Image: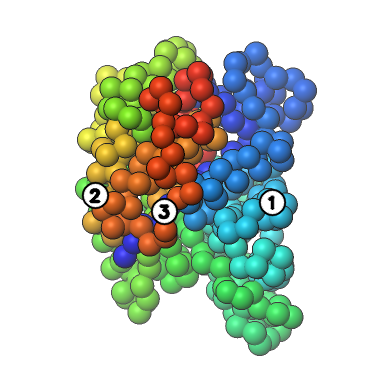
């Protein structure tokens, strides 16, 4: 089992701070009202194309594109980016409650033909009722997972290539099909830490994703899902969502993490923790429990830093250390059964180079990668920085899904 490396596409904006995902005064609804925060980059197609091209050049297999109010639409953005990349795949996040399963199956089939088979699907059931209601979805937490279960059954039936009927509590479909099923079928990624989520993963998905918890907690999740899948007569693969801060030395990496904290005053952290504490997501609550809102002990496991989660929802931990140390931690998760690593770091352009030129060669040397060497491997660094990374500005991590 080799390691699959994926990067993140910041369709909600990029920057060098943890304080606010987009740094817009009104949450990003009006893009002309920008909070005066240095280093903010709007998610225009030209900048996103830079990141996508860099990810492809550095040897990442795919990029995750988030979904939600403050993001550009994942389907439209990524299909545009297929036209400026050649091999890079796109892990498109979407919420089942916002779209018909038959239409989603048809969209996936079209996407595969346009992109020549470069679509991966990330099904996001949704853990925030306020966000769900914004899109017209008023189901409760467990009901949403029950609907996701039906949604994925309908999609699989429609992809079979013959008319498919389905009668459930949430969907009733007669003769559902796509004129031409997608080829290949897009792998389905899915995450959820609640009791309602586990059976959905076991019955339907290809890759179960967890946020970056300490290895012993990740092992518990893997054992849980693997056991449920065995009861269904299925096999599920596993992935993890993490930020990264890797540098030529451990000291440099932790100095970067420390600079992130300098931006976070107590009021900012308290306000973020109060808002995040209202989430219905069990995964989000597990992220919050890793640090308890305190800065006192943010290295919750060797090279695993929970500082991102002080102010950001979703994935709240980062791998921090030298390139070899970060590779050590990836190897440790891999030994537990984690195959897919969905990574990010702010700004996403620069941090992709730090990881791609620093950690990826370490993993390749350990025999953990199937692919050939990155085109940039072996390019000499200048002044301790990757040769092709922009110079000068501190490289900081921010949030994402």
| Above or below, 364 relative to 154 | above
Residue drawn at point x = 76 percent, y = 27 percent? 30
Q: Which mark is residue 387?
A: none
Q: Secondary structure at mark 1?
A: loop
Q: Is residue 387 left or right of residue 152?
A: left
Q: Position of residue 383 (x, y in %)?
A: 41, 22
Q: Position of residue 324 (x, y in %)?
A: 27, 39
The crowd level at tag 1 (other Cα within 10 Å; few <14, some 14-19, many 20+) is few
Q: Are marks 1 and 2 in contact (CB under 8 Å)?
A: no
Front of the two marks 1 and 2: 1
- What count of labels does the image hold? 3
Q: Which mark is residue 332?
A: 2
Q: Is residue 396 left or right of residue 286?
A: right
**Going from the N terminus, do you reach mark 2 or mark 3 first?**
2
Q: Position of residue 342 (x, y in %)?
A: 44, 48
Front of the two marks 2 and 3: 3
Determine the residue located farthest toward the bottom in the rendered image.
162
* Residue labelled with disc 1: 84
Residue drawn at point x = 69 percent, y = 60 percent? 99
The crowd level at tag 3 (other Cα within 10 Å; few <14, some 14-19, many 20+) is some
Q: Secondary structure at mark 3?
A: loop
Q: Which mark is residue 373?
A: 3
| Above or below, 151 relative to 391 | below
Please identify the quarter of the rendering in which residue 233 is found: bottom left
Please identify the quarter of the rendering in which residue 172 is found: bottom right
Foreground of the two, 320 or 377: 377
Residue drawn at point x = 36 percent, y = 57 percent? 369
The crowd level at tag 2 (other Cα within 10 Å; few <14, some 14-19, many 20+) is few
Foreground of the two, 129 or 228: 228
| Above or below, 209 relative to 301 | below
């Amino acid at each position: 089992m080799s390691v699959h490396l994926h990067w993140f596409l910041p369709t909600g904006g990029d920057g060098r701070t943890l304080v606010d995902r987009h740094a817009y005064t009104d949450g990003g609804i009006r893009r002309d009202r920008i909070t005066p925060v240095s280093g903010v980059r709007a998610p225009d197609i030209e900048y996103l194309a830079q990141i996508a091209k860099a990810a492809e050049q550095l040897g990442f297999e795919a990029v995750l594109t988030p979904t939600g109010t403050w993001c550009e639409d994942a389907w439209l953005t990524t299909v545009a980016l297929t036209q400026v990349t050649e091999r890079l795949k796109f892990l498109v996040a979407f919420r089942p409650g916002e779209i018909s399963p038959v239409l989603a199956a048809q969209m996936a089939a079209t996407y595969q033909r346009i992109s020549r088979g470069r679509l991966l699907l990330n099904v996001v059931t949704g853990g925030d009722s306020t966000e769900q209601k914004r899109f017209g979805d008023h189901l409760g937490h467990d009901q949403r997972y029950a609907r996701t279960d039906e949604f994925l059954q309908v999609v699989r039936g429609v992809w079979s290539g013959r008319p498919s009927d389905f009668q459930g509590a949430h969907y009733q479909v007669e003769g559902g099909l796509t004129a031409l099923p997608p080829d290949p079928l897009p792998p389905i990624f899915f995450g959820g830490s609640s009791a309602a989520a586990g059976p959905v993963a076991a019955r339907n998905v290809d890759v179960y994703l967890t946020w970056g918890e300490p290895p012993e907690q990740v092992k518990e999740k893997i054992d849980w899902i693997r056991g449920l899948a065995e009861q269904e007569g299925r096999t599920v693969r596993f992935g993890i969502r993490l930020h990264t801060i890797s540098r030529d030395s451990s000291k440099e990496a932790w100095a970067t993490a420390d600079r992130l904290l300098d931006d976070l005053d107590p009021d900012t952290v308290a306000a973020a923790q109060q808002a995040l504490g209202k989430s219905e997501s069990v995964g989000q609550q597990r992220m919050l429990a890793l640090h308890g809102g305190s800065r006192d002990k943010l290295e919750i496991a060797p090279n695993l830093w929970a500082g991102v989660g002080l102010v950001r929802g979703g994935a709240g931990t980062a791998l921090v250390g030298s390139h070899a140390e970060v590779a050590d931690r990836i190897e440790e998760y891999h030994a537990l059964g984690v195959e897919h690593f969905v990574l990010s770091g702010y700004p996403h352009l620069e941090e992709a180079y730090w990881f791609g030129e620093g950690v990826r060669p370490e993993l390749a040397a350990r025999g953990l990668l199937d692919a050939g060497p990155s085109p940039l491997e072996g390019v000499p660094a200048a002044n301790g920085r990757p040769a092709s990374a922009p110079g000068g500005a501190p490289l900081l991590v921010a949030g994402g899904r």
